[in-house]
Structures are given as structure tokens and as C-alpha cells.
Amino acid sequence: MPTYLRYLTKAQRVAEQSDGAFDVTVGPVVRLWRLARRTQRLPDASKLEKARALVGYRNVRIDPNRHTVQLLKPGMQLDLGGIAKGYSADEALVTLKKQGIASALVAAGGDIAVSGPPPGREGWDITIAPIEEGEPTPHLRLNDAAVSTSGDAEQYVEIDGIRYSHIVDPRTGIGLTGRSEVTVVAKHGIDADSLTKVAAVLGPEKGLPIIEAAGGSGRVLRIAEKGKGVALSKSFPPTHNGTAP
């Protein structure tokens, strides 16, 4: 199966599992929010309504036999930013393994995929980025796995006193407003990358069960008026402080 069909098929599967909380057809809405970050103004209401009408994973038809993808509404646009980096990290590891490199780490922004551990070590020591400066930085020790972290620590816009994340809820067309950071550990980067958006949009109560059902594990850190709270999957790997020798 061609590369584009493989990750689009995975994207559609995650969309179905999350009932549209993850949806790569969100492109028209994302374009408006990118403009909002540049202009410091909310998207025009009428343009946002028209863009929302073009969002819907059910309007994507994939034919694996003919190797085609059809968008059923004129004006639809795909945005693969929520899944492509994880997929790219996976493919880089595959290429390295073909060259005989069995121990490697591939970093693609907030997405990391690793193969066998470094020589003499139990695994790769990976830091979870803090949601705010000065916060503790827990570390994971992983091998033959992938990890992705998504949040609004760096990409956001503040308009009229409200902070909007770059992560957009495909169902509403609005950038997320609750401060949160989601980390997902999975076997493959394509899963870890896409599933972070599911938990960011749905929250830990609904998001973590979907992550677990997909074979991953998650950590959701949220900031509210009452303080910070962390929710973990039962299978989320233990964290530690600092790098092991």
C-alpha cells in the first residue's frame, strides 16, 4: 500500500475510534486559526462556519484497491500535522534498521521513536517537556517504542484574555482553551502522535480509555483554577528524575 494510503487509513481509524475528536479534514479550520495567531484576532464567524461545514472524516473515501483518496465535499482540505511527524519517525527507524543500525533515536519535534537501547544502557532517557518554565521534568526510559507530547506551551494565541491552543477541536472549530499537556507512549510514532490530540480534545476521562484500547498509554497534565492535576493510564511507564548512568 502506498505511503499516503497507510497513514490516511490510520488517521481514519483514529477518527472513528474517537468519534471525530481527531480528524485530518480539519484543514479549512486550521488555516483560519493560523491566521488568527498572526493577526491576534478571532476567526471571522461566517468564515469559521463555512470552514466547519467542510470538516468530517466520513466524507473521505479511501479505495485501497485503486490506491485513491476522494474528498466528497468541494473545498475540503486535509491537515496531516497531527499524525505525519510520528509516521515520519517510524519510517526513519525502518530505514536505519535496513542499514543495520539496531540502536537509534529519531526526534521529530515533539515526537520521538526509538529502537534498541544505547550500548550499556537499559533504554533511552527521554524528558517530558514541562508545561511551564520551572516545572519538574519527569523522564521516561524507553526502547522499541514511541512517545509524543502535545500541548499549548509554545503554540497558542491570547485574544481578549482567553488563551487558545493551536490544537483545534474538529467538532467545534475552536482552539482548545483549557491548559493541558498530553503525553502518549505507544509501539509506533503514528499512534502516539495522533492519540495525543484525542486526549487533548476529549480530556483524560474519555481520552485515556481510547488510548488504552489502541494499545498505548497516556499522561494528561491539566492546569485549572484549583491547581494542577495529572491523570495516568494504568500502563503508563514509570517516570524518574534525571538521567540514569
Image (cartoon, grey):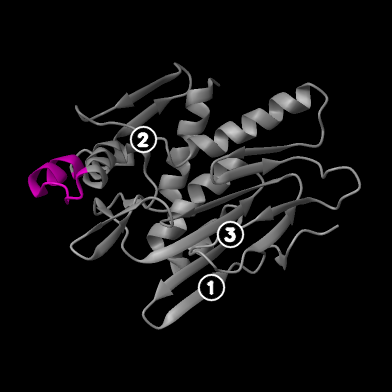
Q: Is residue 25 left or right of residue 231?
A: left
> Depth check: 160 or 69 in front?
160
Instruction: Tell which residue pokes out farthest to the left in this image.
Output: 46
Q: Is residue 210 left or right of residue 52?
A: right
Marks 2 and 3 sit apart, C-alpha to C-alpha, by: 25 Å
Rendering coords of residue 117 (x, y %): 82, 45
Q: Residue at x 45, y 70 (%)?
A: 222
> N-terminal of the two: label 1 or label 3?
3
Residue that carries the numbered disc 1 in the rendered image = 230
Of 211 and 231, nearer the camera is 231
Q: Residue at x 28, y 31 (%)?
A: 77
The residue at which mark 2 appears reads as 79
Q: Amino acid at mark 1?
A: Val
Q: Is residue 78 left or right of residue 245?
A: left
The image's mark for residue 212 is 3
Viewport quadrant of the N terminus? top right
Residue 104 is covered by the magenta coloring? no
- The x, y position of residue 175, in whole percent, is 29, 54
Compare residues 169 and 16 and report the one nearer the observer. 169
Residue 86 at x, y = what percent?
56, 39
- Around disc 3, counting alpha carbons within 10 Å, would you say few (fewer than 14), some (14 to 19), or many (20 or more)? some
Task: Give the image location of residue 54, x and y in percent.
Answer: 21, 38
Helix, strand or loop at mark 3: helix
Q: Image height check: is 19 above or below 81?
A: below
Please check the rendered image and state whether residue 43 is part of the magenta-colored stretch, yes or no. yes
Magenta part of the protein: which range? 39-52
Q: Quadrant of the C terminus?
A: bottom right
Asked if residue 4 is positioned above or below residue 225 in the image, the reply reads: above
First in sequence, mark 2 or 3: give its number: 2
